[in-house]
Image (cartoon, rainbow, N blue to C red):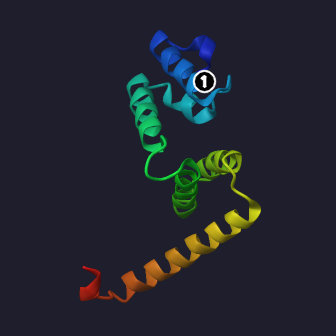
Amino acid sequence: MIEYEDASAEVRTVFDDIRATRKTEYINNFWKALAHDPATLRRIWDSLKEVMAPGALDPLTKELIYLAVSATNQCAYCMASHSASARKKGMTDAMFGELMAVVGMANQTNALAAGYRVQIDECFR
């Protein structure tokens, strides 16, 4: 992990932007790990800011989608991070339960459709 005090000027610039954007002094371990490659750190941070910015989908919906994909990909780190973020944006225990039910159902039906090689209905095209 690259700590702020040990970071290059390029990395400190990104860390400062993370702090300002998120209104926190905390830099999480994901960013500290990426700091070993400043170009990747900058690219991922810039992309994340763009994708997660308010748009047609509200910020909570984006966090819920991120959480669902993280659960499907079994990324414990991303689940922890985006659960915390979703809770700050209003996710309740009931919402989390329903989200996990949908994730589980989608994974199950996706596997069945793929396994049975179900042809796509013409009306869905």
Residue in the image at 62% along x and 48% along y: 82
Residue in the image at 33% along x and 88% along y: 118
Q: Which residue is mark 1?
A: 19
Q: Please, is residue 122 above or below residue 69 in the view? A: below
Q: Please, is residue 80 above or below residue 118 in the view? A: above
Q: Position of residue 102 (x, y in %)?
A: 58, 73
| Closer to the camera in the image, 48 or 111 | 48
Residue in the image at 52% along x and 80% along y: 108
Q: Amino acid at mark 1?
A: Arg
Q: Please, is residue 8 above or below residue 91 in the view? A: above
| Closer to the camera in the image, 105 or 36 | 105
| Closer to the camera in the image, 69 or 36 | 69
Quarter of the rendering occupied by the N terminus: top right
| Closer to the camera in the image, 104 or 21 | 21
Residue in the image at 66% along x and 71% along y: 98
Quarter of the rendering occupied by the C terminus: bottom left
